[in-house]
Amino acid sequence: MAVIKYLFATDKKPVRGLLAAEWVVLAYLVLTLVLIFFTWTKLPSPEPMVWGRLRIVVTTAALWAVYRMVPCRFTLLCRVTLQLALLSWWYPDTFDLNRIFPNLDHLFAAAEQSVFGCQPALLFAERLPNPVVSELMYLSYSSYFLLVAAVAVYYFFRRYDEFLRTAFVIVASFFLFYVVFVALPVTGPQFYYLAAGLDNVAQGVFPDVGNYFLTHDEMMTMPGYEDGFFYQIMVHAHAAGERPTAAFPSSHVGVTLVLLLLAIRTRCRGLIWFVAVLFVLMCFATVYIRAHYVIDVVAGLLSGVILYFTTQRCHILVS
């Protein structure tokens, strides 16, 4: 009963216009819509991309109207939840845009080879095939959106005054990564190694595959314990939404670091430990499952710190 009363409590200061997080989505939507129109003839299916954006605008407007009629915490939560839920829709959309540009994985794989003298993403899982290690890696990687939900829900129920700022930080971080992914077509080891040929990769040869991913989206079989519960979760998740995109920097690492910093801000030990443990595992898991090069992880750590403090400051300016 207390939860229902909390959810339907009237906002003392209802937001009249769009939320800061919604403005971020709208800005990204317009930016990519312009890109779609300028590259229309190169895109395989531009019409569904446009209609998808139109549906998002209509749904966002509808929830705004509902909130204006009933300005309570629940209707505000619905507005934020929509944008958080759509983050997984926007992710494969980056592939539809960046695959029209030549692939750059050969540069990143070569840099990885230069730094480490090998390809850690190729060797990591082979050296640690233990089922427990495998399941821990896939558990952490599959917890990505669970972590987003956990931090957002905590702020909604325990620090409501900071909820909209937290939503903005999370949404803005995702979309800034998406902008980079559109402009920087890097697929990551699980796609590039297959396209380049495993024999070439093992010998330190990294061919430029050009526009290969314009017509191909095959990926390597994921390494690890194939009968594992979390392994199977990732198999189904990849089949549903994984695309040859979004490798540099690692948004899994960057966004999870942002979530960890948000958790630390709450001073809630349970939340901090929950996010921290999965964050540490995530840094290893991205390489273990061959989603990223090690340099992607390093870049993700740096970008996560920058995004956290930048988006905090930006919220002050837009709110």
Image: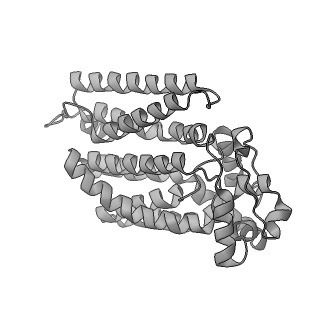
Q: Which residue is drawn at 36% across and 37% down?
A: 27
Which quarter shows the C terminus? top left
Give residue 218's position: percent from left, percent from top: 76, 45
Q: In which quarter of the image is residue 112?
A: bottom right
**Can see residue 130?**
no
Q: Is residue 117 left or right of residue 96?
A: right
Give residue 238's position: percent from left, percent from top: 67, 45
**Can see residue 18?**
yes
Q: Which residue is drawn at 47% across and 53% down?
A: 147
Which quarter shows the N terminus? top left
Report the number of numbered marks.
0
Give residue 6's position: percent from left, percent from top: 25, 39
Query: Residue 44, relative to residue 81: is it above or below?
Result: above
Q: In which quarter of the image is residue 259?
A: bottom left
- The figure's colour scheme reads one colour
Q: In this view, does 114 lie to the left or right of 167?
A: right
Give residue 132's position: percent from left, percent from top: 70, 67
Q: Residue reaching furthest right?
A: 199
Q: Residue at x 73, y 74 (%)?
A: 118
Q: Is residue 33 left or right of residue 315?
A: right
User: Residue 311 or 210: which is nearer the viewer?
Assistant: 210
